[in-house]
Amino acid sequence: MGAQIFHGIDEVAAAVGEHLGYSGWLEVTQERVDAFADATDDRQWIHVDPERAAATDFGGTIAHGYLTLSLLPALGAEIFDIDGVRMKINYGTNKIRFLAPVPVGSRIRCGARIQALERTPKGANLVTAYVIEIEGGERPALVAETIRVLVG
């Protein structure tokens, strides 16, 4: 199943409050975690030292919280997209919470709901509520409310 496509701001506005579905599952590999550590210079051992991390309550390495957050654009694009606008610009977040660690080797997926849409003179501000779930996990890894500027 492909992403739901909204054709313009009016269609997005009509979907406020709707749960749009889920992305596919994505395995979080040590290679991805190591690449993120290299890109951000965040090489904390709980992320990059499997031997040392194995002795912790986590039982192994875990993904950076910000790595999980950084996957929202890609996973979200599997759920929905908007055409009929000139630009879509990340503006920020209202809320981010890291609720559970993501063990390396686990699989995650993203759910999305259109939270709000505020019209502006040049388009709209779109608020989307995302949840990143861990396959078999009791709690979500992450909840986030993001804001995108849609320029008509």
Image: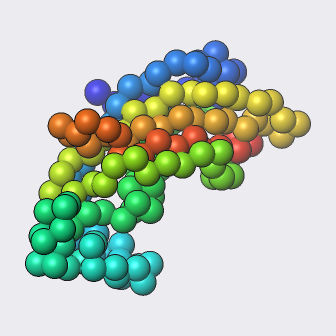
The residue at the point 51 percent across, 27 percent down is: 113
Classify 101 as above or below 152. below
Q: Is residue 143 left or right of residue 12?
A: left
Which is nearer the eye, 42 or 120? 42
Q: Is residue 124 left or right of residue 140?
A: right
Residue at the far top: name it: 14
The quadrant holding residue 63 is bottom left
Which is nearer the eye, 16 or 83? 16
**Quadrant of the rendering where the N terminus is positioned:** top left
Give how far across and how far down residue 27 sits, in percent: 20, 52
Give how far across and how far down residue 100 sits, in percent: 34, 49
Does residue 110 appear in this view? yes
Which is nearer the eye, 124 or 144? 144
Q: How many marks?
A: 0
Q: Is residue 81 left or right of residue 38?
A: right
The quadrant holding residue 152 is top right
Classify 7 as above or below 67. above
The residue at the point 65 percent across, 52 percent down is: 92
Rendering colour mode = rainbow
The residue at the point 66 percent across, 36 percent down is: 126
The residue at the point 35 percent across, 31 percent down is: 22
Does residue 75 appear in this view? no
Give how far across and how far down residue 32 sits, in percent: 26, 67
Give how far across and how far down residue 8 sits, in percent: 65, 28
